[in-house]
Amino acid sequence: MAACRALKAVLVDLSGTLHIEDAAVPGAQEALKRFVTNTTKESKQDLLERLRKLEFDISEDEIFTSLTAARSLLERKQVRPMLLVDDRALPDFKGIQTSDPNAVVMGLAPEHFHYQILNQAFRLLLDGAPLIAIHKARYYKRKDGLALGPGPFVTALEYATDTKATVVGKPEKTFFLEALRGTGCEPEEAVMIGDDCRDDVGGAQDVGMLGILVKTGKYRASDEEKINPPPYLTCESFPHAVDHILQHLL
Amino acid sequence: MAPWGKRLAGVRGVLLDISGVLYDSGAGGGTAIAGSVEAVARLKRSRLKVRFCTNESQKSRAELVGQLQRLGFDISEQEVTAPAPAACQILKERGLRPYLLIHDGVRSEFDQIDTSNPNCVVIADAGESFSYQNMNNAFQVLMELEKPVLISLGKGRYYKETSGLMLDVGPYMKALEYACGIKAEVVGKPSPEFFKSALQAIGVEAHQAVMIGDDIVGDVGGAQRCGMRALQVRTGKFRAAQHVLQGTCSGPGAHTCSSPKTLPEARSPGAGRGITQEGQSPPVVLAAPCSGNWALLWTAPCESSSRDSTADRRRPRACSCGAVVSLGCLDSAPALTFTAGTTWASPQVRSGAQAVLGHLFPVPSSRTPFQTTVHSPGPSF
C-alpha cells in the first residue's frame, strides 16, 4: 500500500505507546519526530518533565496535545476564550487574550463544571460565541469509580444553545490536521503510532495518514478488528513500529 | 385570514404557562409581567375555565403560588398542574425510589417518597444544585442500575429570570442521557399526559382549549400536538430576532400577539397583507393554514440550517417548492429562511400546512445568527 509514499512525519501517541504512567515502554527512547496526546490536564511543561525523567530526548515544540490543538484553533479564529480547563492546563494558553471572551473552551475540568460557570458559558454561546471542546469523553475512571467526563457537559451546552461544538481532540480530524500543520506535511506523508485503535489509528487513517497500532498500553486482543479499514500495521511495540518505518517507509 | 373570533371559536378553557408569561422569577420574589395580573383577572371574570400549567420544578406549588399571590395574581394551589406531583404519582405506581437531583425548594413535594436505596434518578430544575458532585452522584446511581431509569421534570433548554437567561433542566437531562447512553422520561410539558391531566382538571377537551406560553417547544408545540390551539408570547424566554428580511407575502394574513393582555383585543390584518409589526422586534405570527390547524411562524436568531458547525451558517438552501429553506429545527419542525426580495406563495411545510410570510425589518447584528421557523402541528409533526 504505502511503500511508495514519501514519509515525512511520524506522530506518536504518548500514554500507552511511549510510556505507561511513569515507566517507559522498553526501548522507546529512540528517535522520534513528534508526540501526540489527548491529555487535557497536564500542560506541555509537565508532560515534558515526565518524559525527560524517562530519558526521552524531546523538546517542547515537539509535543502536540489536544490543548495545543485548541490553542491553534483559537489563534486561527482569533477569538478570546472563556477557558473551562484544568488549572494545570492553563500554561498552554499563555499569551492568549481571555478578557471579554467571545469563545468557550471546555476541557476535562470537573471542578469548573458548576451551574454558575456553565450558565456564564451558556450566555456567551447564545450570543454567537463558538464552543470548542477538547474532547467529548463520556466518563473516565477515578479511584472512587466512574466520573463524568467533559462530554456530557458539552452536550448540555449544545442542547441549550442548539449548536454543535468543534471537538479538537483525538479522534477528530481537527486534531491530526492541527498536529501536522506545524510539520508542513500532508496527511498522506505522515504515519501515526498509537495504542488506541479507534482514537489513534482510526482517527489518523480517517484523515489520510497511515496508522500503526502497537500492542502496549490499552491495547486489547483483536482491537485491530474494530476499525475499518484496519490499521496499516499492528505490531508489538513502539520500537518495532520504528523499525518497520525505517526499513519500509523511508 | 379569519378574524380572531373565528379562530378562537369553541374555546372554553385556557391553559396558562407561568414563568415568562405571568412573571419572571428572580431575586425578591420575581417581577410580574406588565398587565398579566389584570389579564388573569379578566380571564377569570369571563366564562372561560382557567388552569395554570407550569413546568416549575425549582420550588413547591405552595411557594410558587405564594409568590404569585404576593404579586397580586388570583391563583391557588388547586388550580396548578405541576410536574413534581405528577412524577410522585409515577414513582408510586412503578415502585421507584429516586435519587433526587433537585433544588431544596421543591423537596417538600417528595416528602411521601421513599428515597432509600435508589433505583432511579429524578432530575428537575436544580439550578445552583447542579454541582459537578451532585451530577456525578446521579450518574453513578444510573451506571450501577441494570435498568437505569431517568425521570426528568420537563426538558426546557432555558428560562428567563430577572437577571437574564438561565440553564433549565433540559441540558442537564441531556448530559446524563449522553453519559449513560439512555433516554429520559419527561414528566411535564411537552408530554401529552401532562397536558391531558391539566385539561381533565378543568373538564375541557383539547380542541376547546388554548395554551399560552413563552416556550415554542414546550408550551406551544406540545399543546398543538395534543390538538389544542396555542399562543406564543414574546415575553419570558422568547428571543426577538435580530435580523429580519424584506419580503412580500401572499396567502392569508397573520397577526402577532405580544402578551396575554392583547389576546381578546387582537386586530386582524387586512386581507392578503402580512404580518403586523409591533415595535422593533420581529413578529410572532399566527397563521391558520388550510386544514384548520395552526401554523406558527416567528423569527429567532440563528441562520444555521444544519447542526453542522462547520457548515457556513449563513448559507440557505433551496427547497423543491422554490422557497429558500434552512433546515434548522425546533423539535424537528422544518425551518424556513427568507431572503431579501423573495416573493412566494405558500411554501409547503411538512404536512402541507401553509405558512405566511410578511414584512420583517432588519436589525443588523453580525454576531447573532438568525433563523426563521415554521412550526406546524398535526399528526406528522
Image (cartoon, coloured by chain):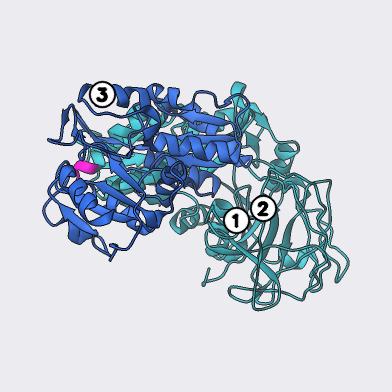
Left or right placement of residue A231 versus residue A138 in this view = left
Q: Which residues are magenta?
A: B143-147
Q: Is residue B185 visible?
A: yes
Secondary structure under badge 1?
helix
Q: Position of residue B140 (x, y in %)?
A: 25, 37
The one of A26 and B238 positioned closer to us in this rendering: A26
Tell if the residue under mark 1 belongs to the same chain as the one under mark 3. Answer: no
Count residues near mark 2 (Cα–Cα under 10 Å), then give few for <14, some for 14-19, many for 20+: many
Check disc 1 and report the residue beneath it: B220
Q: Is residue A85 magenta?
A: no
Secondary structure under badge 3?
helix
Check disc 2 and report the residue beneath it: B232
Q: Chain of mark 2?
A: B
Q: Say what amino acid the circle numbered 2 marks.
A: Gln
| Residue at the (27%, 64%) spot, across then down | A228
Q: Chain of mark 1?
A: B
Q: Say what amino acid the circle numbered 1 marks.
A: Val
Q: Report the Cα–Cα distance between label 1 and label 2.
A: 6 Å
Q: Position of residue B272 (x, y in %)?
A: 85, 71
Check disc 3 and report the residue beneath it: A52
Q: Is residue A122 visible?
A: no
Q: Position of residue A190 (x, y in %)?
A: 35, 52
